[in-house]
Image: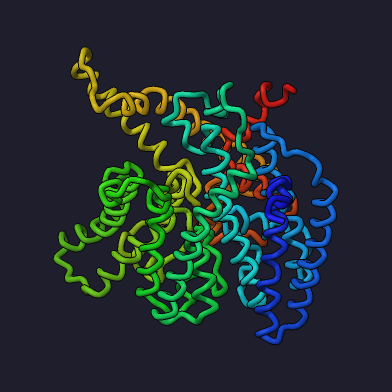
Amino acid sequence: MRAWLSRLPLFLQMAGVAALAMYLPAFFAVSQNDFFAARSFFYSATLFLLLIGLVGVAMSGRRPRLDARNQLLTLLAAFTVLPIMLAVPFNEAVLTTTFYNSYFEMVSSLTTTGATLFDDPERLSQPVHFWRGIVGWMGGFLAWMMAAAILAPMNLGGFEVTSTSMAGQETGTFSQISKVASASERVTRFSMMLAPIYGVLTLVLWLALILAGDTPFVGLVHSMSTLATSGISPVGGLAGGDSGRAGELMVLFFLVFALSQKTFMPTRNKNWSQRLHQDPEIRIGLAILVLVPSLLFLRHWVGAYEINDQEDLPAAFSSLWGGLFTVFSYMTTAGFESADWVSAGSWSGLRTPGMILMGLAVFGGGVATTAGGVKLFRVYALFKHGVREIEKLSHPSSVAGQGAAARLIRRKGAYIAWIFFMLFALSIALVTLALALTGIDLEPAMIFSVSALSTTGPLAVVAGETPYSYADLDGLAKGILAAAMVLGRLEALAIIALFNPEFWRS
């Protein structure tokens, strides 16, 4: 049975896992005496498993393709076609929305964007919220698998910065190797390696949130959303829960796993603490975490000192914590807002402090994590290149040290990181223009674009002077944003790699 499943196309395996996951909200709905939602999820799961089994039997004699084109097309199908299946039980359980809106909701959840059309959480029942959390959680795990099993061998997703091969070109395929592992085999291997880590981290955070005061249901959804950095919440965010600052502290600790893959990826290196200390993504992330909230805090503190104003110390701590947590949350593209963020905004005196969060979301988190955005490692490559160019202004004949790897990052790595940054900026401009053509004003169009491309859906609520709602968009604008979410998750280089002529040569 296991051998037969491993020979199935990767997309069918993903669809099978998604269909099995539909039983979870079905059983949960039964425990809540919501039998209508239970039937919606149970019947959908059974129907799709039957169809997947029939298709699997029909394709059991075919050998899976090993080329890079098929792998990228599978990922593209996973984020565009698979949400159609995921939207069926959602639409059946809600009834007060259209299937198109349900599809948008599932694309948002699977890409870990967390943009929702339901501004009032009470419009959805708990089983439906649970399903949104499960889909986002599976999308986060898919991001791990996608990076380790598909994008890394092809030098995409940020791995191209340190690679000596071209982006989109598979490495390790030599003529003397008689068998090359298929994408399904690689996904299976990395799933067995990473699934226990992903699951245990989610379980530990869930228990910690329960101890902090959250109900088991709210704590579970928030823990899944934290590990997936999806920002999905059944109560409108962490502020709607009962865990308070203790819960925010727990979430802050587990968001560290979105800074770098070295925080969770198994390795033979026993000196784990030294490996994290030397990781450039963690160092840049922690520097931003210290610098930005400090500037927001000191901006008001200096003004208060000049007028000899004695500020309330609890209010000062509240504003500092609100800025610290929210900055880190948006930098990792989770999109959780601290209950003290309003205090931080008032303390800083800025009219739109959310614009800072938009810039942090563009930076994003670590390579091969669930975070979106440009990624911190590309920012590090551009930073090192800039430092080196400044050094050459003073000492034109100097020779930089730190080894061949550092020289590769400063030269070729910085070059391709700059290309990706320009592609990301161009994508923001094109999506903004497309949204503007639908009748949306420039400011909300840009905020919606950055939210989708950085997979930070809650950004639309805090980035502008007034909150913007996805529910106010028309059908065309929702379709544009859904495509932008897929582009933000797969990244532009992976999409461009599909146009490589070598991929389409037999």
Q: Is residue 469 left or right of residue 383?
A: right
Q: Quadrant of the N terminus?
A: bottom right
- Residue 239, percent from left and from top: 45, 73
Of 160 and 506, the residue lying toward us: 506
Q: Residue 94 occupies which quadrant of the picture? A: bottom right
Q: Quadrant of the C terminus?
A: top right
Q: Is residue 96 left or right of residue 328?
A: right
At horizontal 68% and vertical 21% (from top left) the residue drawn is 501
Of 347 and 426, the residue lying toward us: 426
Q: Is residue 350 above or below residue 392?
A: below
At horizontal 50% and vertical 69% (from top left) the residue drawn is 222
Of 357 and 223, the residue lying toward us: 223
- Residue 451, percent from left and from top: 54, 51
- Residue 261, percent from left and from top: 42, 48
Can residue 478 be spotted in the picture? no
Q: Residue 296 occupies which quadrant of the picture? A: bottom left
Q: Residue extending furthest bottom?
A: 33
